[in-house]
Image: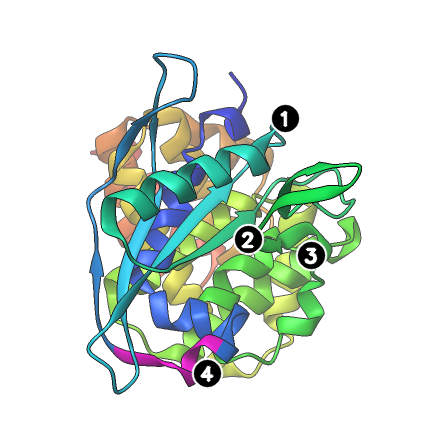
Amino acid sequence: MTQQESIDHDGLFKELIETFFWEFLDLFLPQVLDYVERGPVTFLSQEVYSSIGAEEKRIIDLLARVQFREQESYFLFHIEPQSSVQADFEKRMFYYFGRLQEKYDLPIYPVVIFSYDSPRKEAESRYTVEFPDFQVLQFNFRAIQLNRLHWRDYLRQHNPVASALMAKMQIAKEDRPQVKMECLRMLTTLQLDPARTEFISQFVDTYLRLEADEEQLFQAEIDTLELGERDAIMQTLTSWEEKGLARGRQEEGATIVLRILNRKLGNLLPEVEAQIQSLEVEKLEELSEALLEFESLENLNAWLQNFENS
């Protein structure tokens, strides 16, 4: 199983939208804010439905109840993140619509977030039933297809959803280090609480995991920033990478520590990297705390020397 296959894409997108529901609407469906009461949102429990003509079970990804502005009536947002291309998906959305309509008897606003990387052709956003002489049905849903949106168009949005989803938009390969830097730069300006900051930074890293040469370009991009912005990004990166170290295996932990050290102190000698890769998880955790105080390679070498002598 590849790394991308092991990612819970729908779960990540569901958490993003539940956490930043109004920011999501503001970014992609601002016209809805003209007639909705911007207050508490009721997220209904995931509803399980049987597929038509089969015993298969399916779970609705996200269902939110909101109120019409200055009215006592409500409607539902049904939001489906879709991370892969599926045949007859638009038909499935219509089936969901019918069952939700029957269950709740409320107006339903259906939205799909297409987050796959390819293809880039426009996804279908309607389901029709028609005859040569008569159209019985045309069912439509809002389609947000990230790979048809360009990250630069969202660069100036002061919005946490933009900070996260730029990582899944249309990005040229050579722009990947810059996009990651811009995502995190935007995040540091939002002044979110630590938990939400960590979630978005991990979301970005999940979808913009850089190769070694890209990491160097990423660091070069960060180095062009003013001191305050640079320190804020480094603090965010170091914070969640340390937590990832505590949760991870030895090999993953060593990779994270080396990433931080190379970013902070410059490229390490191969023998120093090998020494760090041989450390046990407990020592890697100690090093991850100590490196916050390192200002030069000499500090690292002194720490490793003390470790050998202990």
In the image, is residue 33 part of the stretch drawn in magenta? yes
- Front label number (3 vs 1): 1
The residue carrying mark 3 is: 217
Measure the alpha-carbon separation of dots 4 and 3.
Answer: 20 Å
- Can residue 256 be seen at all in this image of the molecule? yes
Task: List x then y, in percent, for residue 113.
Answer: 53, 50
Q: Residues within 10 Å of mark 2 (few under 14, many from 20)?
A: many
Q: Residues within 10 Å of mark 3 (few under 14, many from 20)?
A: some
Measure the alpha-carbon separation of dots 1 and 4.
Answer: 49 Å
The residue carrying mark 4 is: 228
Q: Residue placed at 34% from the left, 38% from the top?
A: 99
Q: Name the foreground residue: 259 vs 209.
A: 209
Measure the alpha-carbon separation of dots 3 and 2.
Answer: 40 Å
Q: Amino acid at mark 2?
A: Phe
- Front label number (4 vs 2): 2
Q: Residues within 10 Å of mark 1 (few under 14, many from 20)?
A: few
Task: List x then y, in percent, for residue 55.
Answer: 34, 12
Q: Is residue 27 left or right of residue 11?
A: right
Question: What residue range appears in magenta?
Answer: 32-38
3 or 1: tag closer to the N-terminus = 1
In the image, is residue 232 part of the stretch drawn in magenta? no
The residue carrying mark 2 is: 141
- State which quadrant residue 171 falls in: bottom right
The residue carrying mark 1 is: 87
Measure the alpha-carbon separation of dots 4 and 2.
Answer: 43 Å
2 or 1: tag closer to the N-terminus = 1
3 or 2: tag closer to the N-terminus = 2
